Structures are given as C-alpha cells and as structure tokens.
Image: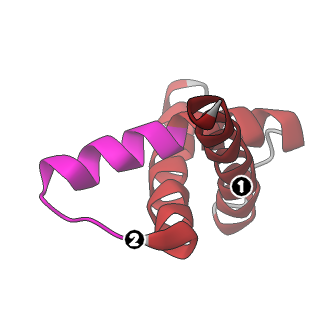
Amino acid sequence: MGNLINILISIVIGAVSGWLAGYIMKSKGGLLRNIILGIVGGFVGGLIFSLLGISFSGYLGTILVSVIGACLVIFVVNKFFK
C-alpha cells in the first residue's frame, strides 16, 4: 500500500510541476500536455540530478527537480514539434 501512495504522490507532484513548467516556458501545448510532460519531466529531472550526484529532500526539493526536468522536456518537445 505504501508504494501505491508514493506513486500517486509522484504523479501529483509531476502534474503540478508540469503546470508550473508550462507557465515558466510559456508553453502553448495545453494543460493536459503540460501535466503529462511534467510527469515525464519528474522522472527525467530525477535521473539527471541523481547522475550528477545531487539530491534534494522533501516535497519542495522534489518539486524543484521535477520543474527543472519538465522545463527541459518541454523545451526538447517544442524543438522537435515546431
């Protein structure tokens, strides 16, 4: 049960991060697209920061990493689909 809650929290944080990243990047892709990219960006940001040996604790750190990852994902997606 604990793993399911952690997954749900990660999805919610990814969704919020995608919304924030869409606002930061002035993405015109729509809310649903930004939420999906935010969830993907959370994984990307976590992977990048772990490879760099940088870790953050708490929900605020997780949101920061996810927003940075989501901004990166939105940037790359916008470059490929423009």
* Residue 49, above or below 57: above
Q: Quadrant where the C terminus lies?
A: top right
Q: Identify the residue shown where x is 15% and y is 47%.
A: 51
Q: Are marks 2 and 1 in contact (CB under 8 Å)?
A: no
Question: In the rendered structure, which amino acid carries the disc numbered 1?
Answer: Gly
Nearer to me, 23 or 16? 16
Q: Identify the residue shown where x is 74% and y is 47%.
A: 12
Classify residue 27 as left or right of residue 7.
right
How far apart are the two marked residues, 2 and 1, measured between alpha carbons? 24 Å
Classify residue 15 as left or right of residue 56.
right
Residue 1 % position (x, y): 65, 29
Question: In the rendered structure, which amino acid carries the disc numbered 2?
Answer: Ser
Instruction: Identify the residue under disc 1.
Output: 22
Q: Does 46 lie within the magenta span? A: yes
Toward the top, the furthest residue is: 81
The magenta segment: 41-56
Q: Identify the residue shown where x is 56% and y is 68%.
A: 59
Nearer to me, 33 or 28? 33
- The disc, 2 or 1, on the residue closer to the chain's N-terminal end is 1
Foreground: disc 2 or disc 1: 2
Nearer to me, 80 or 14? 14
* Residue 61, above or below 13: below
**Element under disc 2:** loop
Q: Does 25 lie within the magenta span? A: no
Graded by Cα atoms within 10 Å as few (under 14), some (14 to 19) or many (20 or more), the crowding at tag 1 reads many
* Residue 24, above or below 41: below
Instruction: Identify the residue under disc 2.
Output: 57
Residue 69 % position (x, y): 45, 51
Graded by Cα atoms within 10 Å as few (under 14), some (14 to 19) or many (20 or more), the crowding at tag 2 reads few
* Residue 24 falls in image quadrant: bottom right
Residue 46 % position (x, y): 36, 48
